[in-house]
Amino acid sequence: MSAYLLGVASIYPGLLNAREQQGNRLAASTQELAGLRFSIILTARWVASASEEIERRNELRTELEELRRRYSEKIDEIAMTFGVQNAIDAKENVERTVTVPSGLDLYFTTSTTSEDDYPCL
C-alpha cells in the first residue's frame, strides 16, 4: 500500500468523526432554536390573553422581547458556526414545525384575537 493511501486511510475516520460531531452540534443548536420558538409562541399568547392581568402582560412583553432577541442571536450563531444556508434551513424548519399542542390552546381565552394577531409569528 502506498504512503498516500495509508495517510488517507488514517485521516478519513477523523474526517467522518468531525462531520458527525458537527452534525450533532447543528442538531443541538436547532433544538435550542426550536425551544426558543416554542417559548416565543407561548409568551405571545399569554401577552394577548384576556385572562392575564395588565401588569403581568407588561412583564410578559418584556420577556417576549428578550426571547425574540435570543432567537435572532441563535440564528446568527448558527450562521457563523455552520454557514448561512444551514441557518436558513434551521430557521425555516423550526418555524414550519414548532406548534403549540391543541389541548394547550384551551388555556388561552383569547376569543377576540386570532393567530394573525400574534406579532412574533
Image: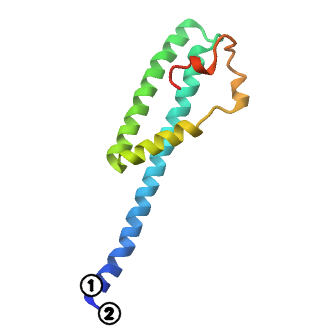
Return the residue at label 2.
Answer: 1
Give the image location of residue 85, x and y in percent.
39, 47
Tell me the residue at 50%/40% (across/down): 92
Pointer 1 residue: 4
Can you say whether 121 is above or below 51 in the image? below
Quarter of the image where one finds residue 38: top right
Residue 20 vertical position relative to residue 105 in the rendered view, above or below = below
Colour basis: rainbow
Q: Return the residue nearer the eye: 9 or 57.
A: 9
Q: Residues within 10 Å of mark 2 (few under 14, many from 20)?
A: few
Q: Amino acid at mark 1?
A: Tyr
Residue 73, percent from left and from top: 37, 34
Q: Position of residue 109 (x, y in %)?
A: 69, 15
Circles 1 and 2 in contact, beta carbons < 8 Å: no
Q: What amino acid is found at the position of numbered circle 2 in the picture?
A: Met
> Element under label 1?
helix
Residue furthest out toward the left? 3
x 28%, y 91%: residue = 2
Asked whether, in this view, residue 103 is left or right of residue 27, the answer is right
Q: Is residue 62 above or below residue 87?
A: above
